Image (cartoon, rainbow, N blue to C red):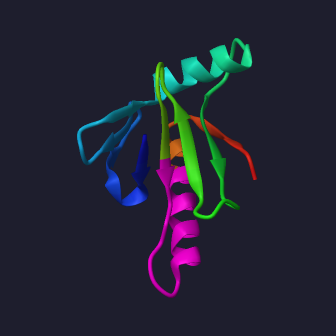
Amino acid sequence: MQYQYQDIVKLSQEGILMSDGFQISFQACSQTWKHMKKVEASTCVAERDITAKPPYFRFYTDDNMIEIVCAGKGLFQKRQGEKMFEQLRQEILRWGFSTFDMS
């Protein structure tokens, strides 16, 4: 499943609420990450790649992979995408979680 950054309605300690009502749970993503990587302790909830065109975050829930794409529009689309990417990264950190850099 793929969403645009603009589809984000709310970010909180619980996760990300999308405009269609879908909720990305940070706890569920962290549990899935630990299971996938076979580690006991981790706050990682997603992979991220700012060098991708467009930049994205990839969250792994129990049974889905959800991407949030940070695509700008117009003449300054690259800069807009990078700004959205950094805002989302900072919000995730703010709530005590991390992301894995794929770039």
Up the image or down, 79 lies above or below 39; here it is: below
Considering the whole magenta stretch, tell me its main secondary structure. Answer: helix
| Residue farthest bottom in this picture | 75
Q: Is residue 55 above or below residue 77?
A: above
Q: Which residues are magenta?
A: 68-90
As drawn, is 58 to the left or to the right of 12? right
Position of 69 relative to 98 (above/below): below
Give the image location of residue 87, x and y in percent: 51, 59
User: Furthest residue to the front?
Assistant: 1
Q: Residue at x 57, y 76 (%)?
A: 79
Horizontal arrangement in the rendering, residue 54 relative to residue 15 (left or right)? right
Q: Examine the structure image and report whether residue 24 is included in the region drawn in magenta.
A: no
Relative height, residue 4 to residue 67 (above, below): below
Q: Which residue is at a point 25% across and 48% down the rendered structure image?
A: 19
Check the picture and name the quadrant holding the N terminus: top left
Residue 22 pos. (x, y %): 30, 36
Q: Nearer the viewer, residue 59 or 90?
A: 59
Residue 88 lies, in percent from the top left, at 50, 53
Query: Which residue is painted at 56% across and 41% down in the image?
Result: 58
Number of marks in picture? 0
Tell whether position 78 is magenta. yes
Q: Position of residue 8 (x, y in %)?
A: 34, 51
Who is closer to the viewer here, 41 or 36? Answer: 36
